[in-house]
Image (spheres, rainbow, N blue to C red):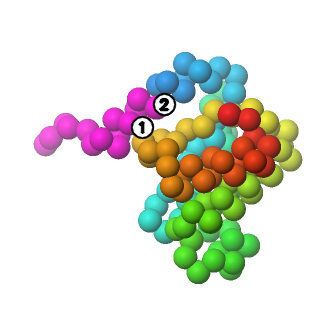
């Protein structure tokens, strides 16, 4: 069996290690994307709980758009996650893009979350 890690896994490992050094006392905005949907959640790593979550699977978003794998949907999810976080009293987070490159849907979600009031 080969133990070679993929480029995606290497980027994810590198990004998470860098975040551990910077994120003392802050929550983490973690992003996952598939070809059809995009998900975002704010995680408290100290307690191991999810504080707020939003995705393109929510009925309000899913009814608006026929294809949920677009940049526009990512922007809507970013605004929604920011609204939910502000309701819970979370303003400062660190952005965990995982192994994804910072462009396209990931960038749109991050920009919309910033516009919604999150600081990172």
Please name the residue shown 40% across and 32% down the image: 13
Mark 2, secondary structure of its residue: helix
**Count of marks placed on residues:** 2
Q: Name the residue under label 1.
A: 12
Q: Give the range drawn in magenta.
A: 1-16
Q: Would residue 65 be counted in the magenta stretch?
A: no
Near mark 1 (Cα within 10 A), the count class, few <14, some 14-19 or many ≥20, is: some
Q: Main secondary structure of the magenta part?
A: helix
Mark 1, secondary structure of its residue: helix
Q: Mark 2 points at which residue?
A: 16
Q: In the figure, 102 relative to 64: above or below?
A: above
Rendering coords of residue 114 (x, y %) = 72, 44
Q: How far apart are marks 2 and 1 (CA)?
A: 6 Å
Rendering coords of residue 79 (x, y %) = 74, 55
Q: State which quarter of the image contains the C terminus.
A: top right
User: Do residues under tags 2 and 1 come within 8 Å of each other at their CB atoms?
Assistant: yes
Near mark 2 (Cα within 10 A), the count class, few <14, some 14-19 or many ≥20, is: some
Give the quarter of the image for residue 78.
bottom right
Q: In the figure, 116 relative to 5: above or below?
A: below
Please name the residue shown 69% across and 71% down the image: 61
Rendering coords of residue 104 (x, y %) = 51, 55
Give the residue furthest to the left.
1
């Amino acid at each position: 069996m080969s133990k070679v890690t993929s480029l995606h896994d290497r980027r994810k490992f590198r990004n998470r290690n860098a975040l551990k050094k910077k994120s003392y006392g802050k929550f983490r905005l973690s992003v996952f994307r598939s070809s059809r949907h995009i998900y975002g959640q704010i995680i408290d790593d100290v307690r191991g709980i999810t504080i707020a979550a939003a995705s393109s699977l929510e009925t309000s978003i899913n009814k608006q758009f026929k294809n949920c794998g677009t940049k526009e949907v990512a922007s809507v999810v970013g605004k929604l996650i920011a609204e939910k976080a502000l309701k819970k009293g979370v303003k400062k987070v660190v952005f965990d893009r995982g192994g994804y490159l910072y462009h396209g849907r990931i960038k749109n979600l991050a920009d919309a979350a910033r516009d919604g009031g999150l600081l990172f």
